[in-house]
Amino acid sequence: MEERPTGQYVRRLWFLHEFLTGRKVPVADASTGNYVPLLDPRAYYATLGSRSRRHRVVNNLVGNADFCPTVRRTDRLAGFEAAGLATEAARIVADFDEDAIRRAVSCLYTKETRSSFDIEGERPSASRTERYVSLLRAVPNVARLTREELLRLRNATVDPRYADHEYRSDQVYVGEQVDLARQRIHFVAACPGDVPRLMEGLLNAFARIEGSGVDPIVLAAALSFGFVFIHPFQDGNGRLHRPDRKANLFIKLCLRNAGKLSPGKRRSHFGEMKDGEVTAMESAVQKRLGAFRGHRDRHEGDGEQRWRRR
C-alpha cells in the first residue's frame, strides 16, 4: 500500500485482508484514487454495494465474512434470465381464475409433501402430512428469516419427539455402507462448533441481499447450497432446502422478497373444483411452459452434444 497507494488490485486485496481476518493493516486510509468495485459486476452477480472510505473500494459482495457465496455470470445463466420465465409464468397464471389457482396449488402442495417424504423413505401420518402442507403455505408469510424461525420451520417437518431448540451439536456426514466394516463417505458437514457462526453469516447474508437487484433464483441457489453445506440440523435439512423441489424455503422467500410471489387472496366464488379439473389445469400450464423445458446437456469425454427434454 505504501508503494502503490492508488493501485486498484492492491486496494482490493487490502480490503479483503481486513474484511476476512478482522485485523487492521497499520497503514493510513487511502486518500486518492477512484472507487473501484470489489467484484466486476460483468463477471459476477453482485449487489449495488457500499463504499469503504478507508480502501476506496465498493463492497458489492453478496454476503459477509462468515458466509459469502460468489456466483459467476455464465452464458447458461444469462440464457435463463433472458428467457423471462417469471413474466411467462405470471401471464399463464393470469389466464386462470384465482379460485382455480388456489385449488391447484393445494393439490400440488399435497403431492410435493408426499414426494419429499418419499425421498427420505418415510410414510408420514395424515396429521404430519397436513402440518407439512400448512408449512409450505405459510412460508411466503415469513416476515424475516431468523434462527428461531428456522427452528420453528424445521420442527414442523419432523416428528415432535425429535424437535430441537438449537442447531446440531454432533458431527454429521453423508455416506453409504460398503460392507459390514466399511463406509464410503461422500460429504462431511461443517464442524458443529462452527455451525452457529456459519448460520449467523448465512442469515445476515440473506438480509443483506434483500432488494439487491440480483436475480432471486440465483440468490436462492447460493443460499440453498450454503444451507445444505452447513447442515445445521441433525434431521430435516433436506425438506427445508430441497434444491430440486418447489418446496425450497429459500426460493420461496427470495421470490417473495423480489415481488414474484405473494400469499395470494382467498376468494371462493366459483365453488370447489373437482380433481379432474385441477389435473386439466396443471396439464395446460405444463403444456404452455413446454417451450422452456428443453435445454442442452453437454456430455464430456466423447465431445458429443445431446438434447433432451426434462
Image (tube, helix red, strand yellow):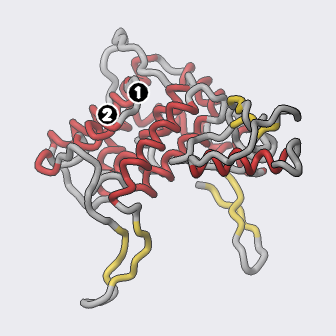
Is residue 273 toward the left or the right of residue 77 in the image?
left
In front of the other: 301 or 250 = 250
Classify 90 as above or below 68: above
For label 1, count other residues whose C-alpha is less than 10 Å away and answer few (under 14), some (14-19) or many (20+).
few
Residue 38, x across and y down, in percent? 75, 42
Residue 224, x across and y down, in percent? 48, 48
Residue 277 makes an appearance in the image:
no
In front of the other: 20 or 277 = 20
In front of the other: 243 or 53 = 53
Could you tell me the amino acid type at mark 2? Glu
Residue at image position (56%, 19%) is 94
Labelled disc at residue 298: none
Q: Earlier in the sequence, mark 2 or mark 1?
A: 1
Distance from label 2 to label 1 (Cα)?
Answer: 8 Å
Residue at image mark 1: 144
In front of the other: 179 or 89 = 179
Could you tell me the amino acid type at mark 1? Arg
Q: How many marks?
A: 2
For label 2, count other residues whose C-alpha is less than 10 Å away and answer few (under 14), some (14-19) or many (20+).
few
Q: State which quarter of the image contains the C terminus.
A: bottom right
| Marks 2,1: beta carbons within 8 A | yes
Residue at image position (35%, 9%) is 269
Secondary structure, mark 1, is loop
Residue at image mark 2: 149
Classify 211 as above or below 296: above
